[in-house]
Amino acid sequence: MRIAIVGTGHVGAALARGLSGKGHAVTLGARNPGSDAASALAAETGSAVTSPSAAAASADLVILALPWAAVDAVLEDLGGLDGKIVVDCTNPLGMVDGALGLAVGHTSSGGEMVQRRLPQARVVKTLNQVGAEVMARNAHFARRPAMLMAGDDPAAKATVAELLRDLGFDPLDAGDITKSRLLEPFALVWINQALARGKGRDWAFAIV
Ligand SMILES: NC(=O)c1ccc[n+]([C@@H]2O[C@H](COP(=O)([O-])OP(=O)(O)OC[C@H]3O[C@@H](n4cnc5c(N)ncnc54)[C@H](OP(=O)(O)O)[C@@H]3O)[C@@H](O)[C@H]2O)c1
């Protein structure tokens, strides 16, 4: 599959590493495609690298690996992405009552906002629930880590489920895109354990 990874930070780089050698044509969409870091990541993972808009234009599936605050402006640049599968890995993180929380929730979610922003694209919320390291490498765990996904298009979710398996995950369908309201706070469960409760970053949830 032709995949664009828009954003080459922790998550974008981890997904490029996790998908390397899995038979996909991956293009990194970097805001500085000529940078040493982007070139090194492309060389390491066997990916191409170009601008976010060029990467997305040539892909069947576009992964958003961006800070929530950048999503709106980057989507403006990418255009409508009509018919494409858009994998939304973002979490709408923000400070709430002095603590890390979600800037949106209960009555909407980041996933729904991305789908509303791209009405002709097939948005799937997933790959937001564990740390980037687990996306790059998880074969050392006793079981495949679970990865929930939410989206309105069953065919898009079937395609994304295959991609999640390629990344070593055990995919689980959470339902339509409104279930992003469950998956985004679920990310905070992982973050709380990893960062506030001393569990570190090398762990994940599994289904037993
Ligand atoms: N880190 C994790 O473990 C983790 C896990 C699950 C979900 N998430 C979520 O995934 C998303 C990405 O997280 P991250 O940790 O990968 O963030 P990050 O390391 O800060 O990387 C963000 C990437 O987005 C790019 N970017 C920022 N603004 C941009 C713009 N206006 N146009 C084009 N590119 C832009 C950055 O470009 P530059 O390289 O040029 O700065 C960078 O490559 C966030 O929403 C986060 O909540 C993170």
Image (spheres, rainbow, N blue to C red):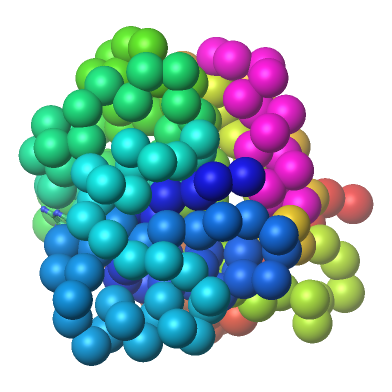
User: Looking at the image, which is closer to me, 1 or 162?
Assistant: 1
When asked about the image quadrant of residue 9, the answer is: bottom left
Can I make out residue 29 in this image?
A: yes
Quadrant of picture, ligand 1: bottom left
What range of the chain is rendered magenta?
152-165
* Relative height, residue 73 to residue 93 (above, below): above
Q: Is residue 190 left or right of residue 174?
A: left
Residue 162 lies in magenta, yes or no? yes
Residue 89 position within the rendered picture, expressed as x and y whole percent measured from the top left: 42, 47
Numbered marks: total: 0
Query: Which one is nearer the viewer's eye here, 156 or 181?
Result: 156
Image position of 39 with respect to 178: above or below: below
Residue 79 image point, x, y percent? 21, 27
Q: Is residue 192 visible in this depiction of the protein?
A: no
Q: Name the residue at 34% across, 66% down.
A: 49
How far across and how far down the image is residue 35, in percent? 18, 81
In which quadrant of the rendered image does the N terminus lie? Answer: top right
